[in-house]
Amino acid sequence: MSDFLLEIKNVSKFFHGLVAIDDLSMKVKKGQIYGIIGPNGAGKTTLFNCITGLYKPEKGDIMWEGKRINGIAPYKIAELGILRTFQTIRLFSEMSVAENIMSGRHIKSNQRWYNGIIHTPSMIKDEKKNWLKVGELMDFFELRKYATTPAGDLSYGLQRRIEMARALAAEPKLLILDEPAAGLNENETIKLAQTIREVRDQGVTILMIEHDMDMVMSLCEYITVINFGAKISEGEPSFVQDDPVVVEAYIGSDEDE
Amino acid sequence: MRQSYKIAIIFLIVMGFFPLFSNSAWLAVGTTFLIYAIVAFSQDIILGRAGAFQMGHALFFGLGAYTTAILNVHYGVPIIYTFIPAIIIPLFIGIALAGPIIHLKGDYLLVATIGFNIIFIQVIQNDIFGLTGGPNGIFGIDVVRIFGVEFMSQRAIYYMSFTLLALTLLIMRNLDGSKYGRAMFYINKDDIAAQSMGINVRYYKLYAFALGSAIAGAAGSMFAIQYSAVSPEAFNVIQSIMFFTIVLVGGSASLPGVLIGTFVMFVLPEIFREFQTARYLVFGLAMILTMILRPRGVWPVKFGNIPNYLKKKDTK
Ligand SMILES: Nc1ncnc2c1ncn2[C@@H]1O[C@H](COP(=O)(O)OP(=O)(O)OP(=O)(O)O)[C@@H](O)[C@H]1O
Ligand SMILES: [Mg+2]
């Protein structure tokens, strides 16, 4: 259709009459690093939940590569190539780091129903291919030495890396990151920004929510600002940064940065 | 879990040689252990792996047993031919019953599955189709005959059960090393995250139900052969509660845990007859204490069963 990978068209989401997303529209281009910012409770995570199928918006369309995808089950959204991380980390915490990342290979694995009972040569090959991919990702994210460690035993920063590795294991077209820098120290944040750039350079489009303004402004190519569920501004970082409406929204809401 | 392979091998070797050193009374106890271990493992697929709170598992065990009994006694079908239907019928009934309730969470699913078990017992007790023999059940089940050779000795029955358990363990090993087994664990640990990784929660839960029910059915068939009789009380809700707690007390998805649980619950009472009356008391206490002191079970499962070539470059 167009060069927009993802289009949000006049989407609204209500919770018991409360407007969480208000007639929101935005367009994400292929290959972009796209940022979403806004004060706490603005509806950013809710928007991500609508895109990934966890919530169904009451109004509007979510278009993926030109096709309407709202209301589709989350697992099918993932199969389309839209993978995410969570603001409140959601790892399989008792399972090892490698097993966590392996979950991302689920949709890439071509095992059949009987392979849960009987192993076949092609299945064993598939299994090995997927574990090796997990190995590559552990190297990329410097997680190899924690391969067999339960994910829940690791630090916040490492857990965020595992979540990203897990999503990337599915070879997504669009990677959705919900506050990836939350809880990270300055060094970790700088490294994260580098990682995100590298991932994009490998051809993955990035859509991210982030409160760390330095990071957002230096990393994102385009930004949408949300307040009370509605878009109040959009544009390149330099524009958004100085937009009086944005400044007003952040001062008005006592936001920390 | 690698360690559990070793335990499984040792267990199979010990159980494989056990008949050489035991009389027929001990063989009967051993057979009971094998059969109940199979049921407990099949419960573990549903509860320990997929995390579905199924508390009606005796229903599928019973379905297998009654399938063999009815086909053999009423229709004269040779025992070995009843084996396949005793697997297929529980499998499809498992899918059919679980289908409408599989989306239910924890306690809701638990209550619904108990409901199925109660209805099942009512049906067989009231002899609804004139096939189940009511409260007395069905007796006079034939012995296994293959090409005219009768396998009726306690030892033969023992080794048939042993083979079935070995097969069950092999299936569980294969399950754990496949995308199917892993998907069950992911769903169990965090179903939102699992869905977001592209896992169809409903499909994999039903898969667990189908597999678990089929294996329980096979064990039921063995049970009918061992006692050459079936009756309702062997498949009531109390039995389901036992299978459920064996998994939770032993340790979800833990091979040694499930074996220990089965041994304590079903074998010790056979060995110590005086323990029989006290078994609910003892196991009840064990359940309470385990949940307080070791909420993940006596022998909790260890994850991290990944191929060695992923562990090698360990040096960083
Ligand atoms: N499942 C839900 N049920 C009811 N209300 C909800 C639900 N999820 C979110 N909300 C409400 O919707 C609004 C937007 O929440 P959301 O989590 O999307 O904000 P956010 O922009 O991500 O904020 P933050 O920066 O703090 O993460 C809030 O008022 C929140 O309380
Ligand atoms: Mg949020």
Image (tube, rainbow, N blue to C red):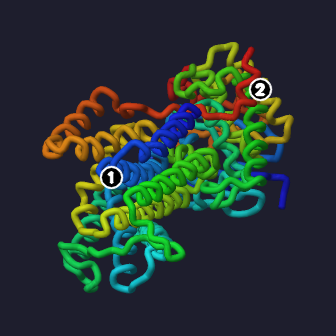
**Residue B129 x, y percent position in the rendering:** 28, 85
CA–CA distance in space, label 1 to label 2? 58 Å
**Dot 2: what SS?**
helix
Which residue lies at the image location 63% right of the left edge and 41% below the top edge? A232
**Dot 1: what SS?**
helix
Asked if one can make out residue B51 in the rendered structure from this viewpoint, the answer is yes
Which residue lies at the image location 24% right of the left edge and 30% below the top edge? B289
**Residue B77 x, y percent position in the rendering:** 43, 82
Lateral position of residue B262 relative to residue A180, left or right: left
Amino acid type at image mark 2: Asp
Lateral position of residue B107 relative to residue B85, left or right: left
Which residue lies at the image location 51% right of the left edge and 40% below the top edge? B13
Q: Using the image, tell me which numbered label, if any, was put on residue A233.
A: none
Asked if one can make out residue B106 in the rendered structure from this viewpoint, the answer is no
Marks 1,2: beta carbons within 8 A: no
> Which chain is mark 1 on?
B
B247 and B144: which one is in front?
B144
B246 and B142: which one is in front?
B142
Residue under label 1: B24
Q: Quarter holding the C terminus of chain B?
A: top right
10 Å crowding of disc 1: few (<14), some (14-19), many (20+): few
Amino acid type at image mark 1: Ser
**Residue A50 x, y percent position in the rendering:** 58, 51
Q: Using the image, tell me which numbered label, if any, was put on residue A139.
A: 2
**Residue A28 x, y percent position in the rendering:** 76, 47
